[in-house]
Image (cartoon, rainbow, N blue to C red):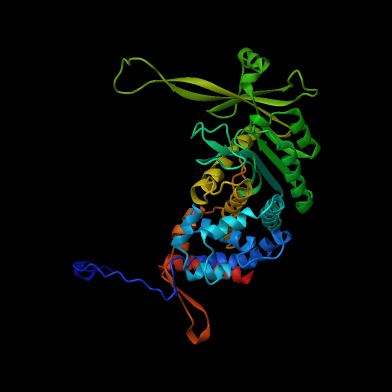
Amino acid sequence: MRSRKAEIVRRVHALPTVNYDDAKRLTSFSGLVLFFALFRALDLSGRLRRCFGHLGRERVYGAARVVLQLIVHVILGFRRLRDRDYYADDPLVCRMLGVTRLPDVATISRTLSEADPKAVTNLRGLVRDLVLGRLAALGLARVTIDFDGSVLSTARRAEGSAVGYNPKRKGARSYYPLFAVISQLGMFFDMLHRPGNAHDSRGAKDFIRESVETVRRKLGRIVLEARLDSAFFDEGVLGLLEQLRVEYAAAVPFARFVTLRHLVDSRERWRRIDDEWSFFETQWRPKSWSDQRRVILVRRRQPKRRTGPLQLDLFEPLDYDFEYKAIVTNKDVTAATVVAFFNGRGLQEQVFGEAKQHAALDYVPCKRLVPNQIYVLATMLAHNLGRELQLRAKPERRTTTPTRAAVFVLKTLGTIRDQLVRRAGALSRPQNRLALTVAAPPKARAEFDEILSHLQAA
């Protein structure tokens, strides 16, 4: 039905007077009720208390409650600890934490500083348990773990940080944790915290063993896969994966080995994968290794701009050249399948980027090491919980792809925040029953109702 212009357009003259409500019944984040229901379904508060139970008598603002606040803090889109002042009186946030007022920044910092490495270990275990619970519920026959490090820069002299590889802020101090990411879920599985000057392989062998054995204990006889970059090209690491019955594909540091370059230079016939990729494979080992392994040498056709003056001004001609890489694998499938599988490793960079942009993964809040480790784990939990919230609502499912892309079509935490969480609302008690009135258009209402119905049914 069409509307007349006079029914839609109106003149606006007056600027409204701004008033402030101190009744503590209005909330700016009514969508938090969805995460509130999720936290209850997961017993997140109880699990956090068990992580910090060894610290002794819990204070008014114990470590578990402070970490829960950090998770909520990140879900709301804040980074710095002092940003808590912008939602300090929000009634729904206070209700989620079970307090009448939120702890101030000094209390948060002091409480985190009292934690110890055992608390960090317990919190890592909680991250793993939540992911394993989701994997067990899905019943996937194949699980892919991507191992890689990511730089977390800091402008301060934080304990345990160091100057190392930092492509965006050269010379800045940083941490360089090693992450394990479950490709099919796009979730963080675990984290090994390290200084910024650590090599990718530092502590990797024990970390990989622990991650694989943890998954095996929970999920039993499933097919486990791993993808690694060239920093993990080590006979000990690959031998460990073979011993643990893990199918892997790892990059070979091509430029380091003259024999590989000679193989490429002398190769005249390459087998075609598609218009872009071609390959050949061989059994090869470095001189210092004891066993040969399957190595696939791949080249990719890439256009390169021609330098210098151009004869024609209607278009810019392109010369085509190749870039090369080598992949070592124990997978018993075609080379094309291995190449597609290995190229899917870039999906973890998407997870890192999403967590840094929407979950403050790259922020270092404190000067002490343990609080910074706890903050990283809190951001990992916030990212994972954003995905778990959607998985509970049974989103669209995809089949397993050669690149091992996520098996569900999911929104980023930032999108959930913008569409659902940041909704104005009012708490009230009609007939002495707590109610939340949400300001939401029909589309947002439909998503609210769908997620809440699944959470309440669980």
- Residue 103, how many percent across, how many down? 54, 64
Left/right placement of residue 56 relative to residue 196 reads right
In which quadrant of the rendered image does the C terminus lie? bottom right
Residue 208 location, quadrant: top right
Residues 452 and 100: in front is 100
- Residue 181, how many percent across, how many down? 63, 45
Residue 257 location, quadrant: top right
User: Looking at the image, which residue is at 57% across and 67% down?
Assistant: 97
Instruction: Classify 123 as above or below 241.
Output: below
Instruction: Classify 438 as above or below 312.
Output: below
User: Looking at the image, which residue is at 72% across and 45% down?
Assistant: 211
Residue 455 location, quadrant: bottom right
Instruction: Classify 156 as above or below 106.
Output: above
Left/right placement of residue 259 relative to residue 409 reads right
Q: Residue furthest bottom?
A: 431
User: Looking at the image, which residue is at 72% across and 28% down?
Assistant: 234
The answer to whether residue 214 is visible is yes
Left/right placement of residue 422 relative to residue 107 reads left
In which quadrant of the rendered image does the N terminus lie? bottom left
- Residue 273, how many percent across, how many down? 59, 29
The answer to whether residue 186 is visible is no
Residues 452 and 177: in front is 177
* Number of disc labels: 0
- Residue 249, how many percent across, how many down? 68, 34
